[in-house]
Image (tube, rainbow, N blue to C red):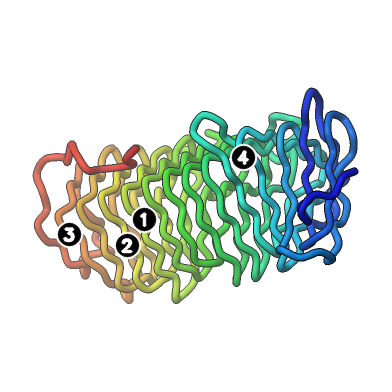
């Protein structure tokens, strides 16, 4: 074990670094190479902030807790394997530094859905990540009320639920694959929050059986721009909310493109609705909103949504500036 500059690292070199989980503190230092154990608790001594890094191939046999005020950094190319009930609990800051050529991977010991719990960002915690993958979790990322997240380029698959978002944050360039006919939960659940989801694909759900994106909460005002959603019962099932925005998006091969419930102030613009049995429907009498310059294959909305303002409907599907961008 070595101490260098108040920073803790667990690095796999020519083998797997085995960490028993524990707490990432804000100082101290511990380093594990090859098959030596890392993890544990880094103390609060030492100056300069400090932190912990996970690099290479790392096996976590217990939950990794990042304490408030502490930072855990995951190196580009790292593969983090979690066993059984081991998860990652973020009370401080989790920084995932993947790159396009060397993404970070989080996975369980089995390839099946639910082989490990997932990443929990607790109130006060922050997740910042680029180019990473989550495979086989029960819940990929659980961003709890009072947390924050900034994510760019993430792949989540073989997972019961990709995202539970009870806080504001941003996600761009996401690929969220469902479980096909085995999908029993929404891929994205928004709980009284206003995240921004951009350039993201959500697909491979259970057509006609399970919703892929669900919005709950009277003050929820999420923004979805340049997204593609397919293979579901509802691409969007909006129970309530006040200011949902969907733009430049492609909703296709769903039983419903959108169910709007009691939501108010919804704006859906410059989007293609294709191969849906119903495009916009199930509006409560209190629901309000606008459909602006959209393309609809079949009738734009069912009779429950007659109060929606429909303007500038286009007669041909958009072929550019629709759906996720590279």
Helix or strand or loop: what does disc 1 sit on?
Answer: strand
Disc 4 vs disc 1: which is toward the camera?
4
Q: Distance between the residues labelled 3 and 1?
A: 15 Å
Q: In this view, does 300 lie to the left or right of 113?
A: left
Q: Name the residue under label 1.
A: 224
> Which residue is drawn at the image coordinates 40% and 48% (left, top)?
235
User: Around disc 3, counting alpha carbons within 10 Å, would you say few (fewer than 14), some (14 to 19), or many (20 or more)?
Assistant: some
Count of number-bearing discs: 4
The answer to whether residue 309 is above or below residue 319 is below
Label placed on residue 292: 3
Contact, mark 2 vs mark 1 (Cβ under 8 Å): yes
* Mark 2 / mark 1, whichever is N-terminal: 1
Q: How far apart are marks 2 and 3 (CA)?
A: 11 Å
Q: Name the residue under label 4.
A: 134
The answer to whether residue 146 is above or below residue 152 is below
Disc 3 vs disc 1: which is toward the camera?
1
* Mark 2 / mark 4, whichever is N-terminal: 4
Q: Is residue 93 left or right of residue 61?
A: left
Between 308 and 85, the one lying in front of the other is 85
> Which residue is drawn at the image coordinates 36% and 55% (left, top)?
224
């Amino acid at each position: 074990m070595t101490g260098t500059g108040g920073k803790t690292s667990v690095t796999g070199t020519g083998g797997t670094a085995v960490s028993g989980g524990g707490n990432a503190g804000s100082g101290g230092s511990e380093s594990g190479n090859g098959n030596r154990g890392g993890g544990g608790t880094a103390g609060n001594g030492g100056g300069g902030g400090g932190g912990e890094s996970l690099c290479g191939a790392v096996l976590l046999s217990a939950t990794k807790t990042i304490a408030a005020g502490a930072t855990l950094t995951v190196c580009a190319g790292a593969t983090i394997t979690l066993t059984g009930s081991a998860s990652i609990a973020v009370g401080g800051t989790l920084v995932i530094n993947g790159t396009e050529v060397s993404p970070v991977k989080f996975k369980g010991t089995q390839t099946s859905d639910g082989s490990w719990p997932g990443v929990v960002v607790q109130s006060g915690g922050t997740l910042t990540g680029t180019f990473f993958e989550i495979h086989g979790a029960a819940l990929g990322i659980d961003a709890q009320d009072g947390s924050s997240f900034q994510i760019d380029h993430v792949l989540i698959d073989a997972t019961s639920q990709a995202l539970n978002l009870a806080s504001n944050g941003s996600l761009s360039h996401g690929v969220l694959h469902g479980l096909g006919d085995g999908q029993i939960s929404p891929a994205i659940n928004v709980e009284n929050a206003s995240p921004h989801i951009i350039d993201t694909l959500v697909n491979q759900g259970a057509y006609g059986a399970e919703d892929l994106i669900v919005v709950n909460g009277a003050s929820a005002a999420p923004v979805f721009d340049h997204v593609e959603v397919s293979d579901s019962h509802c691409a969007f099932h909006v129970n309530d909310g006040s200011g949902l925005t969907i733009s430049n998006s492609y909703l296709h091969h769903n039983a419903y493109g959108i169910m709007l419930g009691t939501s108010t102030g919804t704006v859906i613009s410059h989007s293609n609705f294709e191969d849906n049995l119903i495009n916009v429907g199930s509006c409560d009498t209190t629901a309000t909103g606008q459909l602006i310059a959209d393309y609809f294959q079949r009738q734009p909305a069912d009779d429950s949504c007659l109060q929606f303002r429909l303007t500038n409907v286009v007669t041909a599907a958009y072929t550019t500036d629709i759906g996720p961008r590279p």
